[in-house]
Image (spheres, helix red, strand yellow):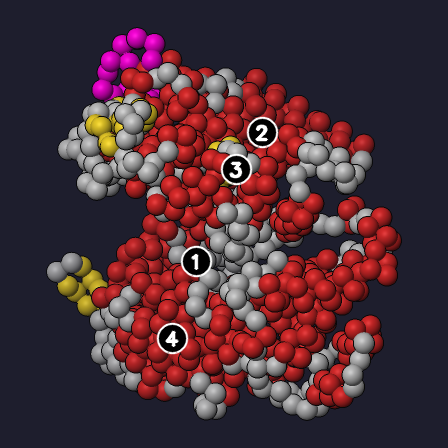
């Protein structure tokens, strides 16, 4: 009978076969050839080329026997700790043949071994790989760049800073730029394909050099393969507003010219080479810079973008047909429909509509036909887009094809509401001509039950595309019909006050800038100006309240009338009202200009304190001047009832800047977290070493009734300079951010950042929200309570975390939290019970999980 120790060894080696042990033995025999004694112990060091080659091949063979099942085995982890130093030392020996072999094995190792296993060795991997980018051998550099990209794409947040420090020390970006420049190939730029890589190079001092070279490669005079290389890199930068803006600011004209040239590749028959089609596709992707505000839009029109788009939408034969005859608008539309039915270059049509819509949205008001290279081609584009829009209205009655039609519908709506009256009037005229014959049928029909929202790349629309366009259309309707009150058109089912209430709810509950902008734009027609929010409503009560003990500034008008205000709120919402030095402690009188009207000032402060205001037309005239002087551009835009500019971010009511160094001058209370230490913590305002925040009583009292009771009741805390809060530092930061912004931030990591965390790190991310959930219940912060529960629910992804949350929830008597975690592990109840994992819970809690499991089973059987 085998001993227990022998059984244990057998159990530990389960899943490993004889081949694994043979290859591992050969590996260590090879590694032994290069081991040398050193002061710090034995380390691998070998300069013999044949030995290096033998070791690298042994490593390659060993990696071949590692599978997803065996990668977690202790013997594999132990072997990797010996492999990495040997492979790294071999790579930096500068022998061409060995470097080529070692760099390929590095790529294979990173691809085969899970990132969680390599995490402890990642710095030992990055250093030799990044150092080898200075090699003159192209294949070595490409392999090393590929390895780095794999590392960066799965890098945990705690190692990120150290890795980028190594990349800076080894001059990684400089070396890659050198290779790109000398070879004319962007194969080395694979590191920049990672969003973090592209972001880092924008922040580096080398960005202009790389961007210049990129734009030079994109030039139409270069061979297609070189243009494609330049466009591929440009695509990495164009996906973010920061990257797109950087390219436009630095190389606007040559960049636009390159994009137009890239889109201009076409053939008379419509048959493009694979290389040409690839260049057109990537040119379309880079043209996403049109979505961002900037000075580049006019350059597209100057280069005849309308003609380029037409030649990509229709083939030359159909364009010729449309230009040969004098046609009525109906005949022209019918012929255009036939042309579209030819299905020419279908794969790029969505991109064309995005380009057309983006250009229309960013047109200047004075844009007119004389600024076009070919007005007729623009007419063709608008007509074809409107045909697609009408088709979408009618096809959705039978089937849900909104994802197919969404780009063309968006383009039409952006043209209709373009700042350019010329484009807007053309689009309206053409579309109305198409809709009139069936207008009654179109209005009566509905496809609400078949329309589903879909995500969008940017937060301008988010998942609220239909809401944005609905608000936009409603605003235009109100603009043309007039106020709901007193009109004779029986179109509105809501009264004016009901309409205001509903739109305010949209502004408060929407996360997308587009919905909030058009909601605010619609409200401006009812005398409400700004962006309503829950936090703004709470802070707004401070201005109308009688809490003068927290005010520290007096604004005095020329007629000696005055208003007491809170310096911290004014400094964030309207710093122009403060004196030039901007920093005051205690009360201070500020005398305003004789041109400032008392009523207008009160309305301005209403906006500063709440994010929105209500005013009649007479006050609005005076308020416009004051808003312009104070540089409150969003308010001024709404007072003038100017349409929102597409993709302009909606302002949020956010007082968190007051938590920075400037706001500390107005601080009158300190909030201390439990615990005396926090790694890396340091106060920018004072020398106190334990974790704390400098806050403001006025904001705390307005945001939380519990704080109001503490600070305004005459209790001991109301006279104290600091208050201890029963939260850890991370939870306290989120609580104060909630008080100052109405948002629970920072949010937990998500996506690959979340998946790259281990169990303990994930739990550490969630615990602050669990702490807040418990505190918000006793402090009666209902919205915060709900938001914390939502966040915790979205983060639950393991049994261990759920069991821990059940324990914490039970200790704090938070049974909703216990129920949430119990439902998560209910499907695994029987397995957990038999495996003993539920033993750490008492019987009452185990019974809650059992009940959740029974309910789940009953529900499944019922279905």
In front: mark 3 or mark 1? 3
Residue on which the image places disc 1: 154
In front: mark 1 or mark 4? 4
Q: SS of the residue at dot 2?
A: helix
Residue at the (55%, 36%) spot, across then down? 527
Residue at the (56%, 41%) spot, across then down? 524
Measured as percent of width and height from the top left, residue 346 is found at: 70, 75
Residue on which the image places disc 3: 617
- The answer to which of marks 4 and 2 sits earlier in the sequence is 4
Residue on which the image places disc 4: 251
* Residue at mark 1 to residue at mark 2: CA–CA distance: 30 Å
How many numbered dots are placed on residues in this image?
4
Read off the magenta span. Answer: 712-726
Measured as percent of width and height from the top left, residue 234 is found at: 45, 73
Badge 2: how crowded within 10 Å, few (<14), some, or many (20+)?
many
- The answer to which of marks 1 and 2 sits earlier in the sequence is 1
- The answer to which of marks 3 and 2 sits earlier in the sequence is 3
* Residue at mark 4 to residue at mark 3: CA–CA distance: 45 Å
148 versus 810 height, above or below: below
Q: Of 822 and 479, which appears nearest the observer? A: 479
* Residue at mark 4 to residue at mark 2: CA–CA distance: 53 Å
Residue on which the image places disc 2: 820
Image-based side of 444 in relation to 598, left or right: right
* Residue at mark 3 to residue at mark 1: CA–CA distance: 57 Å
In front: mark 3 or mark 2? 3
- The answer to which of marks 1 and 4 sits earlier in the sequence is 1
Location of residue 236 (image quadrant): bottom left
Q: SS of the residue at dot 1?
A: loop
- The answer to which of marks 4 and 3 sits earlier in the sequence is 4
Q: SS of the residue at dot 3?
A: helix
Answer yes or no: is residue 654 visible.
yes
């Amino acid at each position: 009978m085998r001993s227990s120790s022998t059984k244990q060894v057998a159990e530990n080696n389960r899943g490993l076969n004889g081949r694994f042990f043979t290859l591992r033995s050969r590996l260590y025999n090879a590694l032994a050839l290069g081991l040398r004694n050193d002061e710090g112990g034995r380390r691998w060091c070998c300069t013999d080329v044949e030995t290096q080659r033998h070791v690298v091949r042994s490593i390659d063979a060993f990696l071949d026997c590692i599978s997803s099942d065996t990668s977690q085995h202790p013997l594999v982890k132990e072997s990797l700790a010996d492999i990495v130093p040997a492979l790294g030392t071999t790579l930096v020996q500068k022998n061409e043949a060995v470097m080529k072999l070692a760099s390929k094995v590095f790529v294979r190792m990173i691809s085969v071994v899970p990132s969680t296993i390599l995490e402890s060795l990642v710095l030992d991997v990055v250093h030799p790989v990044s150092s080898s980018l200075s090699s003159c051998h192209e294949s070595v550099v490409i392999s090393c760049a590929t390895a780095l990209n794999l590392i960066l794409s799965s890098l945990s947040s705690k190692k990120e800073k150290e890795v980028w420090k190594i990349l800076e020390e080894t001059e990684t970006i400089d070396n890659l730029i050198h290779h790109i420049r000398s070879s004319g190939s962007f194969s080395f730029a694979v590191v920049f394909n990672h969003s973090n890589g592209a972001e880092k190079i924008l922040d580096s001092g080398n960005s202009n050099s790389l961007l210049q070279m990129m734009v030079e490669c994109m030039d139409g005079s270069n061979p297609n393969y070189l243009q494609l290389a330049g466009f591929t890199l440009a695509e990495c930068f164009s996906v973010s507003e920061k990257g797109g803006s950087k390219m436009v600011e630095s190389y606007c004209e040559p960049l636009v010219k390159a994009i137009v040239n890239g889109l201009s590749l076409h053939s008379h028959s419509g048959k493009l080479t694979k290389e040409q089609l690839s260049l057109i596709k990537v040119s379309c992707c880079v043209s996403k810079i049109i979505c961002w505000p900037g000075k580049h839009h006019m350059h597209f029109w100057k280069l005849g973008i309308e003609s380029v788009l037409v030649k990509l939408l229709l083939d030359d034969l159909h364009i010729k047909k449309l230009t040969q005859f004098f046609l009525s608008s109906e005949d022209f539309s019918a012929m255009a429909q036939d042309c579209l039915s030819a299905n020419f270059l279908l794969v790029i049509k969505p991109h064309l509509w995005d380009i057309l819509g983006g250009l229309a949205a960013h047109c200047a008001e004075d844009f007119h036909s004389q600024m076009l290279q070919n007005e007729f081609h623009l007419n063709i584009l608008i007509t074809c887009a409107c045909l697609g829009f009408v088709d979408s209205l009618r096809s959705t009655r039978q089937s849900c094809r909104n994802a197919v039609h969404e780009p063309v519908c968006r383009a039409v709506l952006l043209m209709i509401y373009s700042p350019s009256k010329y484009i807007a009037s053309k689009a309206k005229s053409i579309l109305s001509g198409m809709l009139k014959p069936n207008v009654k049928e179109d209005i009566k029909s509905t496809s609400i039950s078949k329309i589903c929202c879909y995500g969008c790349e940017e937060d301008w629309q988010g998942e609220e595309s239909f809401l944005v366009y609905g608000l936009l259309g409603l605003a235009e309707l109100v603009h043309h019909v007039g106020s709901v009150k007193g009109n004779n058109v029986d179109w509105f089912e809501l009264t004016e006050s009901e309409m205001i209430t509903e739109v305010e709810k949209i502004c408060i509950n929407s996360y997308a800038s587009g919905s909030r902008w058009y909601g605010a734009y619609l409200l401006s027609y009812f005398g409400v100006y700004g962006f309503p929010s829950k936090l703004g409503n709470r802070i707004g009560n401070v201005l109308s309240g009688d809490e003068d003990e927290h005010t520290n500034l007096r604004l005095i008008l020329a007629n000696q009338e005055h208003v007491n205000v809170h310096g911290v709120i004014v400094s964030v919402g309207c710093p122009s009202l403060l004196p030039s030095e901007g920093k005051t402690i205690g009360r201070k009188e500020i005398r305003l200009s004789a041109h400032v009207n008392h009523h207008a000032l009160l309305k301005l402060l209403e906006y500063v304190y709440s994010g929105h205001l209500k005013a009649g037309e007479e006050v609005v005239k005076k308020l416009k001047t004051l808003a312009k002087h104070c540089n409150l551009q969003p308010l001024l835009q709404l007072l003038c009832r100017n349409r929102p500019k597409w993709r302009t971010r909606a302002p949020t009511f956010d007082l968190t800047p007051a938590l920075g160094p400037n706001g500390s001058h107005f601080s009158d209370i300190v909030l201390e977290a439990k615990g005396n230490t926090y790694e890396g913590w340091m106060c920018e305002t004072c020398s106190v070493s334990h974790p704390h925040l400098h806050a403001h009583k006025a904001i705390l009292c307005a945001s939380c009734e519990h704080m109001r009771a503490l600070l305004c009741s005459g209790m001991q805390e109301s006279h104290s300079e600091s208050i201890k809060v029963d939260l850890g530092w991370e939870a306290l930061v989120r609580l104060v951010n909630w008080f100052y912004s109405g948002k629970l931030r920072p949010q937990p990591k998500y996506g690959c950042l979340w998946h790259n965390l281990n169990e303990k790190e994930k739990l550490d991310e969630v615990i602050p929200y669990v702490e807040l959930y418990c505190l918000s219940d006793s402090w009666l912060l209902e919205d915060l309570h709900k938001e914390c529960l939502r966040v915790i629910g979205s983060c639950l992804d393991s049994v261990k975390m759920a069991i821990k949350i059940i324990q914490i929830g039970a200790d704090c008597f938070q049974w909703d939290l216990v129920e949430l975690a119990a439902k998560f592990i209910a499907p695994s109840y029987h397995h957990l019970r038999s495996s003993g994992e539920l033993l750490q819970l008492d019987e009452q809690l185990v019974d809650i999980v059992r009940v959740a499991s029974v309910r789940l089973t009953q529900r499944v059987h019922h279905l």
